[in-house]
Image (tube, rainbow, N blue to C red):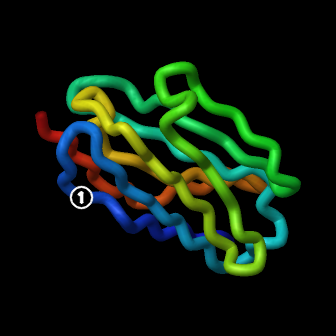
């Protein structure tokens, strides 16, 4: 089993930055793809970015050029550096891991104020 714990959320002004972390524990050697999703109030959960074990990344258009996903395999941790934050980035951000099973973290709230 894999467990995911996110941290780093909080309140930030528009234009500011935050870095989210997701620490994985358990059977982490079986994890292939890790990702960040987000769910804004009243909206469905949506993909933000993914990263494979070899470091290949993918971003959805709204965050391209502003967010960076990275992964430290030695620490079993994935990061999401978020710059130039906008009010529409306000959401609960969830870490997601795919190996033999899919696992979700508990989420961390990011609030961007104007």
The percent coordinates of residue 63 (x first, y second) are 49, 30
Residue 76, quarter of picture: bottom right
| Residue at point 49%, 36% (across, down) | 66
Badge 1 marks a residue whose secondary structure is strand
Judge from the rendering whether residue 90 lies leftward or rightward of residue 4; answer left or right. left
Q: Which residue is mark 1?
A: 10
The percent coordinates of residue 50 (x first, y second) are 67, 42
Q: Nearer the viewer, residue 81 or 49?
A: 81
Residue 88, quarter of picture: top left
Residue 106, quarter of picture: bottom left
Q: Determine the residue located farthest toward the left in the rendered image.
A: 114
Up/down of 82 relative to 31, above or below: above
Q: Determine the residue located farthest toward the right in the rendered image.
A: 54
Q: Quadrant of the C terminus?
A: top left
Disc 1 crowd rating (10 Å Cα; few below 14, some 14-19, many 20+) is some
Q: Quadrant of the N terminus?
A: bottom right
Judge from the rendering whether residue 10 lies leftward or rightward of residue 26; answer left or right. left
The mark tally for this picture is 1
The percent coordinates of residue 74 (x first, y second) are 76, 79
| Residue at point 81%, 52% (across, down) | 55
Up/down of 55 relative to 73, above or below: above
| Residue at point 21%, 45% (across, down) | 111
Judge from the rendering whether residue 27 lies leftward or rightward of residue 104; answer left or right. right
The percent coordinates of residue 79 (x first, y second) are 56, 60
| Residue at point 39%, 47% (across, down) | 93
């Amino acid at each position: 089993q894999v467990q995911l714990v996110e941290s780093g959320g909080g309140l930030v002004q528009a234009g500011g930055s935050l870095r989210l972390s997701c620490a994985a524990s358990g059977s982490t050697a079986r994890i292939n793809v890790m990702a960040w999703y987000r769910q804004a109030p009243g909206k469905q959960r949506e993909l933000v970015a993914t990263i494979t074990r070899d470091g290949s990344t993918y971003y959805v258009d709204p965050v391209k050029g502003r967010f960076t996903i990275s992964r430290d395999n030695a620490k079993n941790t994935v990061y999401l550096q978020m710059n130039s934050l906008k009010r529409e980035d306000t959401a609960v951000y969830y870490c997601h891991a795919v190996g033999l099973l899919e696992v979700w973290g508990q989420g961390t709230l990011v609030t961007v104020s104007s």
